[in-house]
Amino acid sequence: MQIYLTAVQLLTFFLVISVIIGTVFIGIVLSTVKNLGLSEFLGDIIVVLVALEIGPLITVFLIALRSSSAINTEIAVMQVNGEIDALRAFGIKEMSYLYIPRIISVTLSVLVMSTLFSIIALLSGFVFSFTIFDISAAAYSDLIANSITLRDVGILGIKSVVMGFFISIIPIFYGSRTSKEFNKIPVSVLKGMMSVFSSIIIVEALLLTLKLI
């Protein structure tokens, strides 16, 4: 159910956004590559810049805007209403009943949807490569195959999992620590979302630094 709420309900909107942003961004990048005479780096630019950097970032921001804020609000409301205390009174552990399903669903959703975005971006790359550089499907496939490595795939997976973990656990942390006053709920959500976006930037910077070392 949590995966359905996090990913499946967002899928149509996400696909539309992926096609639009992926196509526009790929078009701009490839036009710039042609103007700067960097055609020999075309495969690396498509794979590294678009599939491994832009794809996961856009995905995690979309899911954070929708799911992280919803999780934070939901947990905060439950805390204010005393529902979490009621679960404890009945011997139900909130960690396994409330928190872990949300962490797993958001993490898996970021991983799967980041991969989906990257695939859409690569397909868009073929359309523009054919239009701008007159590259055939076979040549484009060879270009991408020669530019992507298992290490790149691993980095994409690690980045998606780490970001998914943080954008789920941070709103849970702030929501569960909301004081029992209704006017504190917006404050909790605001603090939680600021921390979520800060964590995304920090994780991206750290992984990029590790990749360059």
Image: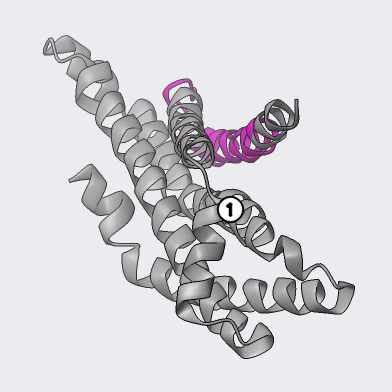
Which residue lies most toward the left here?
90
Q: Amino acid at mark 1?
A: Ser
- Is residue 108 positioned above or below 41 on the image? above
Query: Does the magenta run of residues contain 90?
Result: no
Neighbourhood count class around disc 1 (C-alpha, 10 Å): few under 14, some 14–19, many 20 upward: some
Q: Quadrant of residue 7?
A: bottom left
Q: Quadrant of residue 66?
A: bottom left
Write the residue at 13% across / 9% down. 91
Where is residue 213 drawn, in percent x and y?
75, 25
Which residues are drawn in magenta? 176-203
- Is residue 142 positioned above or below 78 on the image? below
Is residue 82 among what the camera can see?
no
Q: Quadrant of residue 39?
A: bottom right
Secondary structure under badge 1?
helix
Of 132 and 190, the residue lying toward us: 132
Q: Is residue 208 left or right of residue 165?
A: right
Q: Which residue is mark 1?
A: 147
Where is residue 86 drawn, in percent x and y?
20, 19
- Is residue 60 positioned above or below 125 on the image? above
